Image (cartoon, rainbow, N blue to C red):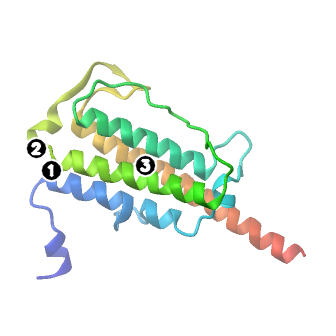
Amino acid sequence: MTAREMTRPKSDFDALKQDLRSVYGGDPWHGSSITTVLAGVDAKTAARRSIPKGHTIWELVLHMTSWTREVTSRVRGSPPKSPEDWPVPKSDGGESAWRAAKEDLGTAQKELERAVDALKPKDLLRWIGDQRDPMLGTGQTVGTIIRGLMQHHTYHEGQIAILKRAAEKGKQATRTDK
């Protein structure tokens, strides 16, 4: 049996669960996973604001964690609420705080995976919220918000990759300027 056959999902529901894991720490179709992109990012780079009024890598990680927790809550049947959308890092910006932020995203991801694993395929069609509110992400099915979170994370992962690359280029320029 080939590796491809061993990982071939047996249903759309299995594919959804596989994709959820892949986007975070596997081998997603689009390229690198979140954990791959975050690898090698130190606290200084994570806290660097490369674009005026733009978000830092650290802020993006906290934002992704916040929405992962909110989607997990909704998957488990809790009523939708507005998460702390753009939390501000509440630390000195040191390596241990940055490591804790990344670990918190990993913990939130594992909680979501467990919540999705507990679902039955028919649960993906359960509605969350009666009214469509794009800012709150309501008026959608459970399956839609899970896929939406993967899209959300992939979008922000791309931003992180660009910010990481810009920081690396900045370090190289600084080294050659001396």
Query: Where in the figure is residue 167, as x and y percent of width and height?
Result: 69, 62
Label 2 Cα neighbours within 10 Å, binned few <14 / some 14-19 / many ≥20: some
Upstream in the sequence, badge 2 or badge 1?
1
Q: Residue at x 38, y 58 (%)?
A: 24
**Amino acid type assigned to the residue bearing label 1 in the image:** Phe
Relative to 102, is 119 above or below?
above
> In the figure, is residue 59 to the left or right of 147?
right
**Amino acid type assigned to the residue bearing label 2 in the image:** Pro
Q: Residue at x 45, y 45 (%)?
A: 65
Relative to 4, is 161 above or below?
above
Do callouts 3 and 1 mark residues in contact (Cβ within 8 Å)?
no
Q: Which of the image's four quarters has the N terminus?
A: bottom left
Do callouts 2 and 1 mark residues in contact (Cβ within 8 Å)?
yes
Residue of label 3: 153
Q: Residue at x 84, y 77 (%)?
A: 176
Residue of label 2: 121
